[in-house]
Every structure is written in C-alpha cells, then in structure tokens.
Image (spheres, helix red, strand yellow):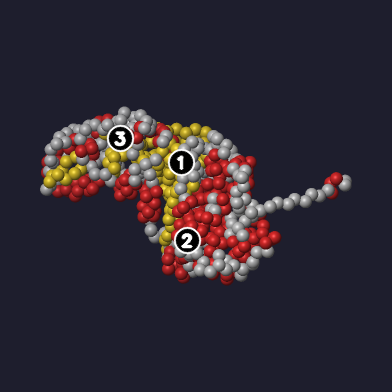
Amino acid sequence: MAGQCATITLTRAISVAEGVFAPGHLGELTQYIPFELVDDVLDQTRTFQQRLRKLPSRVGVYFVLALALFPSLGYARVWDKLTAGLSGLRPWCPSEKALRDLRRRLGSAPLKLLFETVAGPVAQSRTPGVRYRRWRTVAFDGCGSIKVPDQPRVRDWLGKLRRHWGWGGYPMVRLMALCETGTRALLGAVFGPTTTGEIGYAERLLHLLSRDMLLLADRGFDSDDFLAKAADTGAQLLVRLQSRRAPAVLDVLPDGTYLTIIGGVKLRINEAQVTITTRDGRRIGDRYRLATTLLDHRADPAAALVALYPERWEVESAFYALRHTLLNGLVLRSCDRFGLEQELWGQLIVYQVLRRAMTDAVESVPGTDPDRAGFTIALEAARDQIINAGGVLPDDTYAAGSSVIGRAVLGALLPKRRARVSAHKVKCAMSRYPAKPDSPEERPPTSTDITRLDVAIHQMHPAAAQPQPGPAAQHAAPTGKGRRDRTVQLLRSDPDRAWHPREIAEGLDISHYRSLCAQLGHWVKEGLLRKVGRGAYALTPAWTSQPDLKSPTTA
C-alpha cells in the first residue's frame, strides 16, 4: 500500500517572449506564426503601438487568434488561457475594456495581411492525394451560413435575407475560399454580404491559380465569362455543367467525348451516368456533364476524370471544420463590420496553420494520406499547448512528427476513408431551400457504405460532328441538339467561305432567316463563329479542321 501512495514532482522549462510581450503566443502554433512575422505584418500595415505599454500590438494579434481558438469564452477567460502557463512571471490582468480597445487599435488590416502570408498550398508534390498527374487539385466553393450578431451596424453592411415566411434570423456572411483538396488548406479567401453571388467573389481569387493547378468546380461556376477568365490563368479546368446547357458538338473523340467552345475556351465534354449501389441494396444514380481543358482522351480517360471530380467536395469538409469544429457553430462575437472582418481573418489564420501543422505531421511518415489526420485532434492539442505555453519557441530537436500536435495526430490517425452516401438533411425547421418531391431513388437516412460504383460514359455518335450541308444537315445532329450544331456543321462544309444569314437559313431549311441573325451574334460572343464582314460569318479557325489530339497537356 505504501508504494501506491508514492508521489513524484515534475518540473519543466518554457521559453516565451520577455516582459509585456510574454502573453503574446499561440502555444506550439507560434512556430508557424513567429514573432518576427507578426512584427513585420504590423510594420507593413503601420499598426505598431506608438508607445510601449502593457498591451503591445503583437500581443493583440495573438489575442485575436486565441479568440478564434476559444470561441465560446469571453475576453477575460481567453486572456487567462494565454497566461495560464506564465504564473511565474505574474502577468498583468487587463480589463475587458482594455482588451476591446486593443482590438479596435489593431483593426483588420494586420490580420488580413497575416492570412495572405500564411495562405497557400501546404503539401509537397509527393504527398498522396494532392495531385492528379502533374497538377495540384484545387476547388472553389462558398459558404453562406456563418451567423453574425443581429445589430444595426452589422445589418448596414450585410443586410438581412427575406424569406417567404418573413425576415431571416441572424444576418449571414458569405465566405468564398479556394482550397487545396488534398489537404483542405486554403489558398485564399474573401467574404462579404450574401447579396453578392459566389462567382463575383470567386473572380477575386482567380489570380491565385497557376499553371500547375487543376481547378475543380461545381455547376454554380459554369458561366461563360467565369470559364474564360479561369482558363486565362493557365490552370486546367474540370467543371460540372448545368443540365440545361447543351454545348455544341464540334468534334467527337474516339472515346465518345466531344469538343466544344464555351466562352471562347476550347473544352472537352464528358457525359456520364454514375450509379451507386449501397449496402442495403439501394441504387442511386445521377447524370454528370463535365467540361475540361484536358483535351487528350488518351492521357486523361473519361472514366479517370469522372473519378477525380468527387475531390471537389473536400472543400465542403474544410468549411465544416471551420464553421462547426473550430467555430462550434456559434454566432461571431463582434457587433460591427471592422470587428467582424478582424474576427473572420483570425478564424481563417488559425484554420490554415492547423492544416499546415497536420500536413507536416503526416508527411513525416511517407505514404500517409492527409485525409487520415483528424482536425479535432489537432485543434484540442493546440488548445492544450496554449494553456501550457508549450512549444512557443522550437528547440534544437524540433521536428514535425515529434511536436505535441504532430504526435497527437499521428497517434490517432483516422482509418482509411470509406465510400459512403447519406441523405441530404436540412436541419433548420424553416429552411430557405424549397422542398423537393420524393424521389424513387431516395438516399438512405443514415450514412451507408457504397458496395458498388458504376460509371457509364455516354458515347456521342461521330456523325454529330460531320459537316452535312443542305436540308439534310438538320438530321445530322444528335437528339436534343438544335440549330447551333447544324449551323456549325454547315459552315464546316466550306470553312473558307463567308456565309450570310440568308445562305445559312437556306442551307438549314429555315423559312424565317431573320430569327437566325440574333443567334449568330450570340454564337460570335461564345467563340463558335467570327464575323468577317457586314452580315457575313465564318467558323472559328480552331474548328475548320480535325483537332490535334497531341495536346500539350499530355506532359
């Protein structure tokens, strides 16, 4: 019994900044946001303190980031977390008003610049699941359900949404992010009122795309202008088109996919029927129409692109971790625009450095997929390190896998992800989404394993792209194709000729040719045709001959 009552005394040494700067830390995450970086950001935004007092600006930056890590606590309790491991220094305990004034003195500019500094791809090229061939896969998406206080100054900025039953509850912020799908790290983000559409915000992030990236996007980003602007960045595209769009069939490739032009961009269209079979015997299917700038069907088979597209949904997991795990689904605390902007940038910074720490940990074990790193595990380990003031400064033996966060992540790796499906649930009693009729292919109410996945590539008939002038041209297009396809086929029969609307109408057996004139002007804007003179049109030179299948994207 005496041995069971034995005790031991443990002591440890911590290293923090000196003097009034000591509370300015973020535990082990400070190594990703070092003092020198914060000082440089403050210097660039001219938000350094004029006189050194008990709450310097650097401490204010770390305090805002700590607010993001402890969203359910007030100012005083968050300050207690920052100073809990500094009891030997007897740090000063400021009032909540002093901490509020510190936030106001900082503003949002240093936090915005700090996020832009830490944002970006975090994985190495050899990390599993990060690349498709030589391109890093990234995805756009927006989140419009971040709640903010219902205060007059907030409503002046964000407004409130009006529903069919009346005004909505809390005002909402729309957050648009460009995400690295392999690690769910953020390359960039913007936010603002929900009255601005997702494409408007996404265009502000297009400059972050580069030639070594493959952009995945859903049906909300298939507008002609957006596709043209995204393609101009040099990045490759894989975008799902809306079902009501019917691209012109200009050339049919041997695998059944076909080439077209949308917004002046040469694209390859891949239509496929995807059907899944669940463990309980349900069969659920959907039709996908994917547009891509990867034109070589041999280097990029249609089935491979269909299998790649679900990577786009990784950005949804990023928003879930940001909104529900980190923020815990709470309403943001600030009651004016500048405070909300500062708070949101702080949330994004903390999320990004956590993803960077998680990726560093899994990369220390070659072959480990970043999907197996648990965000909640990393978050709780980071919170503990703030309380302990541990790992603020790296020692000589520091390595990503040996850090406290790294050991926590590697010690509880998630199992390999399973293919699963579940019902789309709306948890708000008064949803802004209209009710949908019951479908015979109803999804299972709970998450269910997928036992089989069938992908049927729609084979476009080669006759759809063959030039057939005269009245017979109206029968050359496949079912569902209209006047545009027949016009392209007609012009390809004599590509060097300048066609007038009356001649095109006669060739297509259209009795009222004037109805064709407005359509010809629209097809010029799409890039299918070019105007070569007054009332004269010709096919775009790219489609006057068969396509060169030896695309530069095969490298």
Number of the label disc, if any, that sits on residue 258: 3
Q: Nearer the viewer, residue 477 or 323?
A: 323
Q: How many residues crowd around disc 2 within 10 Å: few (fewer than 14), some, or many (20 or more)?
A: few
- What secondary structure is marked by label 3? strand
- Give the position of the C terminus as an image quadrant: top left
Q: Position of residue 396 (x, y in %)?
A: 61, 45
Q: How many residues crowd around disc 3 within 10 Å: few (fewer than 14), some, or many (20 or more)?
A: many
- What secondary structure is marked by label 1? helix
Q: Residue at x 63, y 41 (%)?
A: 411
Tell me which label, 1 or 2, sits earlier in the chain.
2
- What secondary structure is marked by label 2? helix
Q: Amino acid at mark 1?
A: Glu
Which quarter of the figure has residue 109?
A: bottom left
Spatial CA span between label 1 and label 2: 39 Å
Q: Amino acid at mark 3?
A: Tyr
Tell me which label, 2 or 3, sits earlier in the chain.
2
Q: Amino acid at mark 2?
A: Asp
Labels 3 and 1 touching (C-beta < 8 A): no
